[in-house]
Image: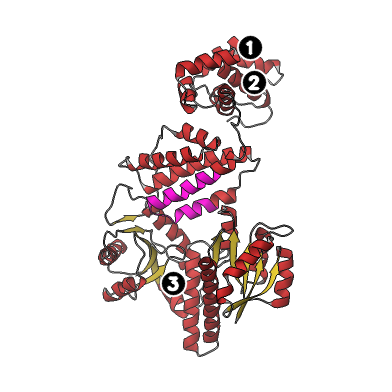
Amino acid sequence: MYTYILVDDEAITRQGTLKKLEPIKDTVSCVAEAENGEVALALIKEYNPDIIITDMQMPVMNGTELLPYLSDHYPEKQIIVISGFKDFDYIKHAITANAVDYILKPFSGEDIQNALFNAIKKIESKEAIKNQIVSSEEEKEAAQYEYDIQMLKNLILGYHKKTPTITSKQLNYINNTHNLILTVLHSTKPIDERSILNCLEGNSFQDMTLYLPHLNNENLGIIILFIPEKSPITSKRLCLQLVEDITPIIEQKNNNIATFGISLQHSDLMELHDAYQEASHALNCQKISQHVSSHYFYERVMTPLFLDWDRTDEFLFRLEAGMTREVEQLVEHLFHFYETNRDCTLNDVKYHCYQLAEQVRSMMNYYLEQSNNGSENSSMQNIVNHIFELGKIKEYYRQFFLNITELLKAKSIYAVDDVIERIQIYLQHNYQKDVSVEFVSSLFYMNRSYCSHLFKLKTGEKFVDYLNQIRIHKSKELLVHTDKKMYNIAKAVGYDNAKYFFRVFKKMTGVTPEQYREQNNLGDKGTGLSSQ
């Protein structure tokens, strides 16, 4: 029988999890419970469980501290992570620790049971490999080859921190005598591994290729094509032949489409991660309007298409205001906007969504007083890099934007009764944008004329005068505390025309921006800050 410990700071949650695992208690049983990582480590030392089920958010020692320790000191333990948040940093820690699964709360009994069965399979698989290693040389080579295959899968996805070593004679020989090209195969339906292997064998590609199912995506397959250093056939011709052979196999399923991304040629298996990234970039070249099987070779230069979505500022406001329903509708509009652009590729969609997400993340960091976490950005990109379907990209970003919306809703940024006060809050936060009374009145569902009239009535100032006051006040801060050039300051506070900025500044202050800076004893010295 296999054993596990359960680590969660909430006793009720632990009880619920144990109840969901009651049906498989004859296969795997709980030997201990812990309310935090520190207690868990003591119990692991005492009971030596096979599996560790742990939450991420806990007092004293949380999951982000516990997982690296387990990875370093108990690499043979199988880890299942449970969390109430689809947090990119949590997912990164789970991947780094080679966790079997990452389960989001609330989860079903089937979810947690399946995770435990997967952990048991991995234990049994490792035990089988260990048994093979101690047998004959032939069995030892087979085990080393299988180990290398698992290592290559992790290497391809960039999970290895250090350069690994090839242990099998077979792969060492191939690596020393062949170059390689990596192809990422994407299918709109789950790939049947056996049919691909049969195709490669039937078309004499068996000795030249290595097929690896993707670790995290059943719609992706990886084909490594080994090319002799003195091949009579060009590598491109071999790749095209491979595509021609496999495409009909994928298309046998109704409405199934095969798309291939093909890397540059490489000389060493240790370059597989670079090759995988190249092939993935090539896959991203597919136009989202294209619905037929196709292939793409990697090109070093891939300039994203400029996508000017005219509802960007509205989207950012609805999200900032915590308007969940409206944000969801605008995400639908955004992806319809992509779909109506015939030249738009997956790469363009990913790039534009990432830029939009960066604006949203900056907003979140401002209101939630968090520093911008580069590792979270990297994890986010890593997840999206493995998605090659528009619908799945849409679902990923829809959930991301809705999660941020819910977080900002709790901040009640616009939770005042008076609509003019809400408009003033918006202007104070967005003065640097191309703001007009027409646009702002539309955000707050008002008639333009009525908005102007009510704004003057409530504040005693015209809309444009109020906006200029904010901008000029912000420009004074930049003049005093930075050495930015005048046209950069003008743009930073919302004026595209530097001459117009000069006129407004002098009208409101009686001096030019240069004179204002000189009066504050900065002159050309500035503060040592960059002149951007």
Q: Nearer the viewer, mark 2 or mark 3?
A: 2
Q: Is residue 402 magenta?
A: yes
Which residue occupies the foreground of this view, 341 or 224? Answer: 341
Which of the 4 quarters of the picture holds residue 370?
top right
| Numbered marks: total | 3
Of circles 1 and 3, the one toward us is 1
Other-residue count near label 2 (Cα within 10 Å), few / some / many at <14 / 14–19 / ≥20: some
Sort mark 1 into few (<14), some (14-19) or many (20+) by Cα contacts within 10 Å. Answer: few
Q: Which residue is mark 1?
A: 509
Q: Residue 476: percent from the left, percent from the top?
A: 64, 20
Q: Residue furthest bottom?
A: 136
Label of residue 476 in the image: 2
Do callouts 1 and 2 mark residues in contact (Cβ within 8 Å)? yes
Q: In the image, what residue occupies the spot 34% across and 55% down?
A: 297
Q: How far apart in space, not on screen, are marks 1 and 3 (Cα)?
A: 72 Å
Residue underneath mark 3: 175
Q: Secondary structure at mark 1?
A: helix
Left or right for 470, reference 319:
right
Q: Position of residue 480 (x, y in %)?
A: 67, 23
Depicted 527 relative to depicted 404: above or below: above
Amino acid type at image mark 3: Asn
Q: Is residue 184 left or right of residue 125?
A: left
Mark-to-mark CA distance, 1 and 2: 10 Å
- Alpha carbon separation for disc pair 2 and 3: 63 Å
Residue 403's disc is: none
Instruction: Tell me where the magenta segment starts and ends, as one range.
Output: 379-404
Three-letter code for the amino acid on which mark 1 is drawn: Thr
Taking the magenta stretch, the answer to whether it contains residue 447 is no
